[in-house]
Every structure is written in structure tokens, then in C-alpha cells.
Image (cartoon, grey):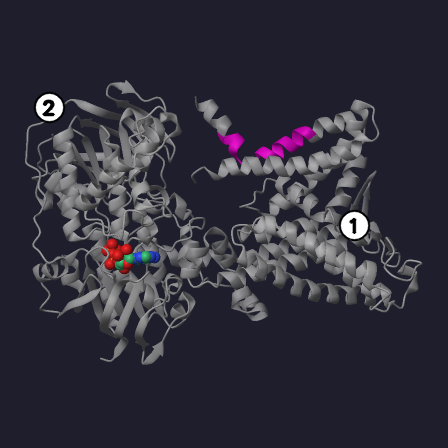
């Protein structure tokens, strides 16, 4: 097989700080090439260079040579890369929020009417929306998902958006090289498998594939070759047959990982929050008449297949979508959902959509971490006669932010660095740090380890266990990572079609979970 | 609680502004004492006069560039073309066609220049288009006040001021006046319906609908929603924005042509001046915002806005017994609409979904 992509002596730095040094790498036609590395090791930077992303030029370009299908290339913009047959599934998604699912999937490749084709050329030809929507629906079904293609992206959960981001690329027929930057970060194992089948099929059709993932089992299973990045350097490569999870982990982190695990314990069943017939109208992720009590001081896992509602509960508590039903918090009925008053009462929701809701991208790491705590609880105001002016206590802030940075392993040049300059995983850590800073009585986190590397993941899980044990914080974790939930939760609630279908003990077997997730009754499980 | 929620949803919706207009118009009409058929005929006239100008605002809004106050530049382009045609005495249908060709070419060049400028001030497009409008206005004034008759020779001495330099204040379009308005004119009792011109306006609406439903239109929408993402999706955002400004300027030129031929003569130095404010107000009155505009907003807005525009001076006059008040009422209505719509829009922007 010939090389479809060759990278020679590639170097890239941001403001003088190297992000990639001396990368040599090649990908063959039909090869699935895995790239693994800790958060901030340069994976996305490398992909952005290959795809001609303008951010690379804006930050000073790169040095080195790239050949694509035998020709030297230096893409000025993404349009050139796309024209040459390169596709990319972006870690932070490239979806147009105000457009529908169907429009997004077909953008730039819309079906058009043949009459107007001949009259005005394809670019100015009338779009066949019906045909577009049909195609888009078919592609989504290949990924095993059915969602109304007429819904606007802005109304969908991150989980569903991930499918759409993928569908846009696999819908293309002119692909030569497909780059996938953490496509499975929010997908559960089953959904991930469907994608992998499609990738294998594409590789049979001689399409080169670059696959970035923090799930090493997945990488081991699907990749023909794996490159490991560490601090911007290529430290090792393995070919199929020699790919072992342990080696990859050792190479990318440099030390062994202690998996987080919470000790089992007896809980007092005193509800802190109770949902009665609670509904959230979030398209594609609806919660319907949910009944659930969460006990004081417990860690409750919430899981479901994509689109069955695990993420919508948090959005409902933030008043982002219309809700119905009753909610009791500490035995008092909540009259109206409102993010601000909920925080004052002691509830904090960390949504999964960090780009849209979680982050102030142009602000520093520091102000992002203290933002909510300071805004609503005045946690970092200097104590003085001028309290009302809201001067920030810098010593207190610094101390806190540095502690968070170390605890969560946030990779940055300084705590004043803008959050948008951090890698995806590190942005996620900033969101987690903010939630931990608020120090609520009830914490709802959605997909807390999305895009986080295997080592930092354990740190985050340990932090959650720690604040739960030391401050008695009640925590609800909505996640598709069943394995993580099983290690930290006291109970795991499985949702099917917007309702709590069953609550399982974390010791239940994977088989049981599999059955319950797909809505099968008749599993022996103690009702907790 | 349900009722309150419903009410607040209604208040936040795009029907808020049109609803206010309907109510205000109704009461103003009652006080004005004007007959229904008079108001109707006037509004229809305004519809065919201003329709295309209002429509020319839609594509820039979809492209995320806000209200294009620089449509006055398109208006000036066609006025320039008309003056050239008249100055060289090209008459009849030939003259009109030549004016259109020159006007479109001028608009194309000017639209390109405006697009280039706006690409340098991303995020501040609206204020920039206002200033561009002023700038081109002074250049235009300069050309026709001192340029015509001096270094630009003019064959038709009738349009030149007696001192031999500069164009007269008003130029008669007698040879073109109301020629097409009267085509297919329908009469139902006292109501007059100029069918042909209505169809022309609707035709332009159809053209805009068509453009927005092409691949190009999808790209315009994408750029309007998120420029950075569009760039990553392979769209040349700068080029799209330039094309959008060219289109809008050309459409505005056609709009001003329809306007002038309906009036039948034009005030060389002022005819274009309020085209932007009146058109923007009409679009907003139909429920559009600076982020979202549809064809129905434009069509509905022209009716709503001009109804109020026509009846309010008379109503003011009757209510306060002061003849001078009428004109103040008009500008109050125009600027008031823009201010109100902007406030309501900004409130809505902070809402999710
Ligand atoms: N726009 C930018 N300006 C400055 N530094 C940047 C910028 N983008 C990325 N970096 C830095 O470059 C390094 C590599 O980032 P990159 O996004 O490539 O990491 P990654 O391997 O994709 O990580 P993750 O697994 O978290 O997605 C990081 O240290 C990051 O802070
Ligand atoms: Mg990344």
C-alpha cells in the first residue's frame, strides 16, 4: 500500500512555546491510524495543521513538510483541504447552531434540481431539501440513531451533536482521508462500536483514517497502527498485533495509573432532592414523567443509551428547556426552576455543553474557575469596608486556582492564559474546577470525563469522591461511561425512554446493565 | 402560572412588534378620519414604491451583517445612472435599459467596495454602513453640484442650474412617469390595484427566496450564524460577505428605480436620503430583527409600517389641532420603530432556543 499522507519534520509552537516538535508520521491508504496522548500533548494541533485550520496561520504557521497523495501541500484554508478529499470530525464540533440537522449534514453538498443546475450552475441551483433530509436521515440511521433531521442543532444535546458531526463526514463520497478527533468521547460503548464498523468499511474502500481517542481499548481494537504523542513529541509507534493498552498508557503518561474507586458503604435513605412526574422537553433527549429520589450524601450515577434522557435532567434543573412536574429540594417545593436561585439554594449543574454554556472562552483560566462562585456567592471578594465594590481578593484566588490546577492536572502556561488557548481536555478540567469551587450541597455533572485522558480522568473521579466524603456533597453523575460510574457510585439509575427504568447496584454485572439499558425486564436485581 | 407563561412567550415572540403596529394603526386610523379606501390605496402605492428596497435588506441580515443602511449607495448608483442617461438624452425604453445597465454595474463595483470595508470591521457592520452611506452621499453631492457642467460635459442643458455648473434640485422623469404602474391597473370600487407592479415586487421576493435556497444561500446562512465554524467547514466567509453586499446594493438600485418611476421625478440631492431608515423600519415592523429576517417580515412590514406612517400625521393633527405636528409624527414613528424593535430583539437574543 502506498502512503497517502506523509509528515516530515513538523514543528509548531504557540507564542514561542512548542506544541509539536519534530513529528514524522505517515498514513497509508486504507489504514486506520490511531493517535493517543495526554491532554495537551498536541493531537488537535497536529490535525488542525493537516486540515488547513486558520487558527494555525493566525498563531504563526508551522515548519516542516506535508505531502498528501504524493504532492507537497500547505493548505491556506480548510476549503483547500476539503477539496482535496480530507474530512475532519472536530473535537469541539463544527456545526452551525441555527441550522437544522439535515442542513448541517449536507452543507456544501446539497442535492439540487437538475433544471436549475443547467440554468445557473450547481452553486446557484435550487436545493432539493426533501432529498437532502432523506440522505441525512439514512446516514444517521447507519450510525444507529434516529433523530428528526428538521430540528436545529442548538436544541440538541452534545451527545446527539456528536453523531451529526460524524454523519456530516461519512456522508461524503469524495473522502480520501478522514480525521476523527475524539469522535467517541461522549458515546457509550455500543454507539462507539457502530462507528467503528463504519470506519472499518471505509478503510476497506481505501480511505485513510486518523483516529484520536482516549479510550485505549477502542484504539487497540480498531487501529492498524498507533502513534503515541507526549508533550508534542512522537514517543513510540506500534503496529497491529503489538498494540497493548498498558504500553500505550505507559508511553503517554510515563507512570502507572491508580484507578479511582469508592468504598462501598451503607447509606441512610434520606432524600435531598425528589422529582415527581418531572418532564423536560429537550428535543431528542426528552425526560418524561420521571420519578426519582436522590439521597443525602450519595453519589448517584445516571446512565442511558443516547437520546434516552440522562442529560436532559440537568438542563431541566437549569431552566434551559420547558419543564413540567414537581421537584422538592430539602423538603421544600421548588416553584420555578432558575439557575441562579438554584445555585443560591445549593444546587449546581455542570452541563455537558461546555462550549455553549460552560465556558467564557476569552477569559482567563483564573476568572473562569472562580466565576460562578464569585458571582453568586461572593466567595473571592476582599474583606473590607468596600465589600460592595467587589474587589477580588487576589491572594485567596491565586491560592485556590493553583490548588485546582495541580489537583486536576490542568496544563497551561499560566493561570492568566485564555481558556480558548487550552486543549479540549484541559477546558473540560476548568469546567470541573469551577463546579468544585462553588461547593454546592447538590452537584449535577454531565459527562465529567469527556475528552479527558486516562490519568486525569482518575484524578477527577477521585476529586468527586473526595468532596462527597469530606463535605457530604450529594452528587449526580450523568455519564455514558458505565465503567466509571460503577467505580464511584452508590447507586446507578438507568433511564429508558425518558423514565427511570431501573436502579442497579454498582456491583451488578455488565450483562445485567446491558439488558436494562436496552429496556429488557426480567433481570434479577435487588431494587435499591 | 400557565397563563403568565403563555403571555410572556407571546411578548417575546416575533409577533410582538407587528401586533403593536396593528393596534397603533387601528387607533391612529380612527382618529385620522381618513377613509379606508384612501388608506388602502396609499399603502398599496407605498408597497410597490418601497417594496424592493425593503427586500434588499434581507440577505445581509441573513448573512449576520445586520441592517444594511448602505442601501442608500445602491439608490445613489441608479440615480447617477439616470442622470447620465438624461444628461445625454437617451430617451424612452432605451434610456431606461441603459440606466439599469449602468446602475447595476455601478452597484456591483460599489457593493464590492462596501463588502471589502465591512470585512475589516467584523462585528461593527451596522454602524459602518451608516457612515459609508454618509460618505458616499457627500461624494455624490460633490459630483453633481460641482462636477456636472465642469469636467463632466453635459449635453442636456435643461437639467443644469442656470449658472452652468451643477444639476438642478429636481429632475423630471416625465418620459418614464407611471408608465408601468398603470399596467394591469385593477379597480374594485374605489380601490386601485396596480397588478403589474405588485407582481414585480413579488418577483423580487421570489428571487430572494430562490437565492436563499441555493447552496450559496446555505453558505450565507452559515456565515450569518457562525463565521469561524463556517471557515472550518470550507466556506470562504469573506467572499460570501462581499457577494452579499453586492447583491444587496444591486437590489437597492432596482428598488430606488421602482421608487423614482412611481414618483415621476426626483430630488437629485435628497431622494435617496431616507431610503435606509424607512426601509429598515418597515422590515422591523414586520417582525424581523437584526439577526433574523424573512421575506414575510418584509412584505408584512411594508403594509404595517406604511399604514401607521400614512395615518399618524393626520391623527396627530386632529388630536392636537396643529398642522405642523404631522411631520414630527412621521419621524417619531420611523425612529421609534427602529428603537423599539432593537430593544425587543436584544431582549430576545438572550434567550435560549
Ligand atoms: N490557540 C492556541 N494558543 C496557544 N496555545 C495553544 C492554542 N491551542 C492549543 N495550544 C496549546 O498547545 C498544546 C497542545 O494542544 P492540543 O489542543 O493540540 O492538545 P490535544 O492533544 O488535542 O489535547 P486534548 O486531549 O485535551 O484534546 C496545549 O498545551 C495547548 O495549551
Ligand atoms: Mg484535542
Residue located at (24% from left, 30% from top): A440
The residue segment tinted magenta is B9-24
Residue at mark 2? A268
Res. B188 image quadrant: top right
Whether residue A446 appears in this view of the structure is: no
Residue located at (31% from left, 30% from top): A382
On the picture, is A195 further left or further right than B146? left
User: Which chain's residue wears label 1?
Assistant: B
Res. A247 image quadrant: bottom left
**CA gap, disc 1 to disc 2?**
81 Å
Quadrant in which the N terminus of chain B is drawn: top left
Relative to B320, does residue B282 appear above or below in the rendering?
below
User: Which chain's residue wears label 2?
Assistant: A
Res. A341 image quadrant: top left
Residue at mark 1? B270
Label 2: state its secondary structure. Answer: loop
On the picture, is B14 further left or further right than A26? right
Give yes or no for residue B212 being in the magenta stretch.
no
Residue A178, percent from left and from top: 30, 66
Residue B77, percent from left and from top: 73, 60
Residue A137, percent from left and from top: 37, 55
Residue A225, label in figure: none
Relative to A430, does residue A438 appear above or below in the rendering?
above
On the picture, is A443 further left or further right than A358? left
Amino acid at each position: 500500500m502506498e502512503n497517502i499522507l506523509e509528515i516530515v519534520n513538523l514543528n509548531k509552537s504557540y507564542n514561542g512555546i512548542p506544541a509539536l516538535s519534530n513529528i514524522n508520521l505517515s498514513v497509508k491508504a486504507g489504514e486506520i491510524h490511531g493517535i493517543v496522548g495526554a491532554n495537551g500533548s498536541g493531537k488537535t494541533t497536529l490535525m488542525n495543521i493537516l486540515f488547513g485550520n486558520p487558527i494555525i496561520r493566525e498563531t504563526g504557521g508551522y515548519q516542516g513538510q506535508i505531502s498528501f497523495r504524493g504532492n507537497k501541500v500547505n493548505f491556506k484554508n480548510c476549503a483547500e483541504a476539503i477539496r482535496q478529499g480530507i474530512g475532519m470530525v472536530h473535537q469541539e464540533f463544527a456545526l452551525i447552531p441555527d441550522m437544522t440537522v439535515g442542513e448541517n449534514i449536507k452543507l456544501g453538498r446539497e442535492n439540487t434540481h437538475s433544471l436549475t443546475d443547467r440554468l445557473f450552475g450547481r452553486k446557484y441551483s435550487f436545493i432539493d431539501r426533501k432529498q437532502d433530509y432523506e440522505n441525512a436521515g439514512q446516514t444517521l440511521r447507519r450510525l444507529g440513531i434516529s433523530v428528526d433531521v428538521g430540528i436545529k442543532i442548538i436544541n440538541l444535546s452534545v451527545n446527539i451533536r456528536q453523531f451529526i458531526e460524524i454523519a456530516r463526514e461519512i456522508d461524503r463520497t469524495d473522502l480520501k482521508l478522514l480525521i476523527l478527533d475524539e469522535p467517541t468521547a461522549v458515546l457509550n460503548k455500543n454507539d462507539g462500536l457502530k462507528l467503528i464498523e463504519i470506519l472499518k468499511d471505509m478503510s476497506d474502500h481505501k480511505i485513510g483514517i486518523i483516529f484520536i481517542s482516549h479510550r485505549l481499548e477502542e484504539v487497540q481494537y480498531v487501529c492498524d497502527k498507533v502513534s503515541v504523542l507526549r508533550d508534542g513529541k512522537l514517543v513510540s509507534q506500534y503496529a497491529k498485533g503489538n498494540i497493548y493498552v498498558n504500553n500505550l498508557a505507559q508511553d503517554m503518561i510515563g507512570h502507572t495509573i491508580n484507578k479511582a474507586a469508592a468504598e462501598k458503604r451503607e447509606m441512610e435513605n434520606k432524600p435531598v432532592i425528589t422529582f415527581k412526574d418531572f418532564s423536560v422537553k429537550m428535543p431528542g433527549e426528552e425526560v418524561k414523567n420521571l420519578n426519582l429520589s436522590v439521597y443525602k450524601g450519595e453519589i448517584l450515577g445516571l446512565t442511558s443509551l443516547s437520546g434516552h434522557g440522562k442529560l436532559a435532567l440537568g438542563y431541566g434543573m437549569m431552566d434551559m428547556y420547558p419543564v413540567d412536574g414537581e421537584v422538592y429540594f430539602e423538603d421544600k417545593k421548588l416553584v420555578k426552576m432558575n439557575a441562579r436561585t438554584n445555585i443560591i439554594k445549593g444546587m449546581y449543574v455542570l452541563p455537558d455543553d461546555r462550549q455553549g454554556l460552560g465556558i467564557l472562552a476569552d477569559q482567563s483560566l483564573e476568572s473562569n474557575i472562580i466565576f460562578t462562585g464569585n458571582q453568586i456567592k461572593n466567595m473571592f471578594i476582599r474583606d473590607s469596608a468596600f465589600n460592595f465594590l467587589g474587589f477580588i481578593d487576589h491572594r485567596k484566588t491565586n491560592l485556590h486556582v493553583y490548588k485546582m490546577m495541580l489537583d486536576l492536572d490542568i496544563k497551561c502556561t499560566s493561570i492568566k492564559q485564555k481558556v480558548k488557548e487550552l486543549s479540549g481536555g484541559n477546558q473540560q478540567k476548568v469546567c470541573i474546577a469551577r463546579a468544585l469551587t462553588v461547593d454546592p450541597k447538590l452537584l449535577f455533572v454531565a459527562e465529567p470525563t469527556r475528552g479527558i485522558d486516562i490519568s486525569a480522568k482518575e484524578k477527577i473521579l477521585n476529586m468527586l469522591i473526595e468532596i462527597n466524603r469530606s463535605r457530604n456533597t450529594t452528587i449526580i453523575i450523568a455519564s455514558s461511561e458505565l465503567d466509571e460510574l460503577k467505580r464511584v457510585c452508590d447507586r446507578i439509575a438507568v433511564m429508558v425512554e425518558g423514565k427511570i427504568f431501573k436502579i442497579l447496584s454498582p456491583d451488578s454485572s455488565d450483562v445485567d446493565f446491558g439488558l436494562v439499558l436496552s429496556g429488557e425486564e426480567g433481570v434479577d436485581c435487588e431494587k435499591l | 402560572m400557565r397563563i403568565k407563561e403563555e403571555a410572556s412567550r407571546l411578548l417575546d415572540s416575533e409577533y410582538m412588534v407587528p401586533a403593536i403596529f396593528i393596534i397603533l394603526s387601528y387607533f391612529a386610523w380612527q382618529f385620522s378620519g381618513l377613509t379606508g379606501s384612501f388608506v388602502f390605496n396609499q399603502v398599496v402605492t407605498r408597497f410597490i414604491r418601497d417594496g424592493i428596497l425593503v427586500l434588499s435588506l434581507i440577505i445581509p441580515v441573513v448573512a449576520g451583517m445586520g441592517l444594511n443602511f448602505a442601501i442608500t449607495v445602491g439608490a445613489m448608483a441608479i440615480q447617477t445612472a439616470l442622470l447620465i442617461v438624461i444628461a445625454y438624452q437617451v430617451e424612452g425604453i432605451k434610456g431606461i435599459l441603459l440606466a439599469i445597465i449602468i446602475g447595476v454595474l455601478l452597484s456591483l463595483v460599489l457593493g464590492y467596495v462596501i463588502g471589502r470595508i465591512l470585512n475589516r470591521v467584523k462585528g461593527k457592520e451596522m454602524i459602518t454602513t451608516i457612515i459609508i452611506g454618509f460618505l458616499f452621499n457627500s461624494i455624490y453631492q460633490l459630483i453633481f453640484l460641482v462636477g456636472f457642467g465642469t469636467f463632466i460635459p453635459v449635453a442636456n442643458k435643461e437639467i443644469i442650474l442656470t449658472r452652468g455648473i451643477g444639476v438642478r434640485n429636481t429632475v423630471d422623469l416625465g418620459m418614464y412617469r407611471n408608465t408601468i404602474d398603470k399596467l394591469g391597473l385593477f379597480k374594485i370600487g374605489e380601490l386601485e390595484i396596480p397588478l403589474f407592479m405588485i407582481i414585480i415586487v413579488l418577483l423580487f421576493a421570489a428571487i430572494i427566496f430562490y437565492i436563499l435556497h441555493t447552496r450559496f444561500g446555505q453558505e450565507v446562512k452559515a456565515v450569518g450564524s457562525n463565521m469561524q465554524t463556517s471557515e472550518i467547514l470550507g466556506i470562504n466567509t469573506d467572499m460570501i460577505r462581499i457577494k452579499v453586499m453586492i447583491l444587496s446594493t444591486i437590489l437597492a438600485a432596482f428598488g430606488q428605480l421602482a421608487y423614482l418611476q412611481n414618483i415621476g421625478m426626483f430630488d437629485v440631492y435628497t431622494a435617496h436620503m431616507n431610503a435606509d431608515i424607512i426601509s429598515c423600519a418597515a422590515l422591523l415592523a414586520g417582525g424581523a430583527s437584526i439577526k433574523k429576517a424573512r421575506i414575510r417580515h418584509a412584505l408584512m412590514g411594508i403594509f404595517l409600517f406604511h399604514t401607521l406612517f400614512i395615518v399618524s400625521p393626520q391623527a396627530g393633527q386632529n388630536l392636537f389641532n396643529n398642522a405642523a405636528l404631522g411631520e414630527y409624527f412621521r419621524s417619531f414613528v420611523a425612529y421609534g420603530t427602529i428603537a423599539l424593535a432593537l430593544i425587543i430583539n436584544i431582549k430576545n437574543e438572550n434567550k435560549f432556543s
